[in-house]
Image: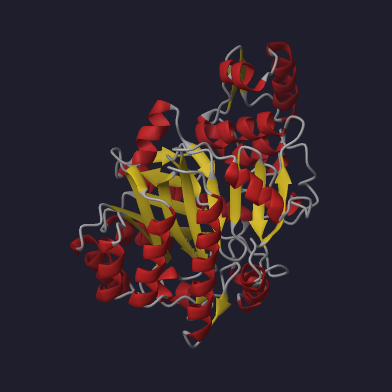
């Protein structure tokens, strides 16, 4: 059994480690990838294939203090309307370069607060998406929904447009915690939103909560989880709050002395994890939970679980196209990210081109390392047969690497001819183990904590 002392000595409580939703991670993107690269990568998508499409809406009616996402507040809908017009123009550009017959396996609206859009804006955006590509069979259309910013009319539009998965942000139901993080959202408001979503036949419900928040205790996170379970969500993401006020200035509103210690963060996570497990949810990767019949649980059982910028996914499409300011796209050739400033983004699209500002073209052993890290993050083990067959790795080289990594973790991992395996009690170290396969300089970057 691994002790807290061992976890501490191995760096769990003080290391700054990426979440590895990509490899290399976004801080290592550069301006070497241009709009021309983005365009050529789109044109190289196989005809009649499938892609995932992400639309980013960076606006919020209010800015929550805990959030480190690229968002901006607005008191009027005028800038939102102009932004939606630009998104539609970017979709038209995509349509001009997308090979024939390509369909959408996934469509996701994120933010920010995409439910800030008026019903007319939503209809127009949905119509434009349909002009670009039809949904594939068994496609999924998901939307991030703020329970404080939703009503029946907007849900009617989304449901009629094919939304079959809704994602609600909860964070924590405790009133003191909500006040401290600038996110007032009562249980009753959240329950009403869930009931409206269910009433419209939306098949699946996701929910996000956070651990490591100020004033959070095991008793309080227990109460939040129990209230959340009363909604019977299909999936839950249990993210660790990352306090990075040097990056997200609004987090300076949160008193750092009210934050739990790293050791207490682990206890909060374990408390919530056990509650989800006791309620029959499958543990998915490092921070997700899913009902047994949910697509994530099935993907985990069949070895098809993947990881992308939204977290864990059962989408097997090799292409994720992100549109909107700061959106990131993933192709077999690499990553491309739009410029973050909404004004610069809108200017680029108005000038008739894509707004790509940075990215990374795969080189060397990037793809091999990316897949090894994804395997560890998804399945807690690597599979040598796939690495040798699909990425040209050699058994002897893999064995040598695994031995070195295992030594660095005091022999707490397991190594065999099949691959490297992270045992159950060592899984809090997963991101640290993944970093051992990262050839880029993540150690000096300011990332979220390891747990």
Q: Position of residue 128 (x, y in %)?
A: 41, 63
Q: Position of residue 387 (x, y in %)?
A: 62, 21
- Can you say whether 179 is above or below 435 in the image? below
Q: Residue at x 36, y 57 (%)?
A: 225
Q: How is the image coloured?
A: secondary structure
Does residue 20 appear anywhere in the picture?
no
- Can you say whether 229 is above or below 412 in the image? below
Residue 54 shown left or right of residue 152 in the figure: right
Q: Which residue is drawn at 44% across and 52% down?
A: 237
The N terminus appears in which quarter of the rendering?
top right
Dividing the picture into quadrants, the one containing residue 175 is: bottom left
Q: Where is residue 74 in the image (x, y as percent from the top left)?
A: 52, 84
**Closer to us: 289 or 143:** 143
Looking at the rendered structure, the number of numbered marks drawn on it comes to: 0
Does residue 399 appear anywhere in the picture?
yes
Q: Residue at x 40, y 34 (%)?
A: 299
Residue 330 shown left or right of residue 75 in the figure: right
**Closer to us: 315 or 323:** 323
- Can you say whether 441 is above or below 2 in the image? below
Residue 379 shown left or right of residue 328 in the figure: left
Q: Where is residue 272 in the image (x, y as percent from the top left)?
A: 42, 51
The residue lying furthest to the bottom in this view is 76
């Amino acid at each position: 059994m691994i002790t807290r002392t061992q976890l501490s000595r191995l760096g769990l409580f003080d290391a700054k480690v990426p979440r590895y939703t990509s490899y290399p991670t976004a801080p290592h993107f550069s301006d070497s990838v241009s709009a021309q690269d983005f365009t050529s990568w789109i044109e190289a998508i196989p005809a009649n294939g499938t892609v995932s499409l992400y639309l980013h809406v960076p606006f919020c009616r209010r800015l929550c203090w805990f959030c480190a996402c690229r968002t901006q507040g607005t008191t009027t809908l005028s800038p939102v309307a102009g932004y939606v017009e630009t998104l539609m123009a970017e979709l038209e550009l995509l349509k001009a370069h997308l090979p024939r017959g390509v369909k959408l396996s996934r469509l996701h609206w994120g933010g920010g607060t995409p439910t800030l859009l008026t019903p007319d804006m939503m209809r127009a955006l949905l119509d434009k998406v349909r002009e670009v590509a039809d949904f594939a069979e068994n496609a999924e259309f998901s939307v991030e929904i703020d329970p404080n910013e939703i009503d029946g009319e907007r849900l009617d539009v989304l449901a009629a447009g094919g939304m079959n998965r809704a994602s609600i942000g909860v964070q924590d139901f405790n009133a003191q915690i909500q006040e401290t993080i600038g996110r007032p959202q009562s249980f009753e408001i959240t329950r009403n939103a869930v009931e409206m979503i269910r009433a419209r036949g939306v098949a699946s419900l996701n929910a996000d909560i956070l651990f490591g928040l100020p004033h959070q205790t095991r008793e309080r996170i227990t109460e939040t989880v129990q209230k959340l379970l009363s909604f019977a969500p299909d999936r839950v993401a249990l993210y660790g709050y990352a306090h990075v006020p040097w990056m997200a200035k609004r987090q300076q509103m949160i008193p750092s002395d009210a934050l739990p210690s790293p050791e207490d963060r682990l206890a909060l996570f374990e408390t919530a994890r056990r509650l989800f497990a006791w309620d029959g949810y499958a543990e998915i990767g490092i921070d997700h939970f899913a009902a047994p019949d949910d697509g994530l649980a099935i993907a985990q059982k069949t070895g098809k679980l993947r990881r992308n910028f939204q977290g864990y996914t059962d989408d097997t499409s090799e292409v994720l196209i992100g549109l909107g300011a700061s959106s990131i796209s993933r192709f077999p050739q690499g990553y491309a990210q739009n410029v973050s400033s909404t004004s610069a983004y809108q200017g680029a699209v108005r000038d008739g081109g894509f707004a790509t500002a940075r990215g990374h073209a795969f080189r060397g052993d990037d793809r091999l390392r990316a897949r090894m890290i994804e395997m560890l993050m998804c399945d807690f083990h690597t599979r040598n047969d796939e690495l040798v067959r699909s990425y040209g790795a050699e058994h002897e080289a893999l064995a040598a690497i695994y031995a070195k990594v295992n030594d660095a973790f005091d022999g707490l991992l397991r190594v065999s001819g099949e691959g490297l395996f992270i045992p159950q009690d060592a899984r809090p170290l997963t991101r640290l183990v993944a970093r051992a396969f990262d050839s880029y300089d993540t150690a000096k970057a300011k990332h979220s904590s390891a747990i």
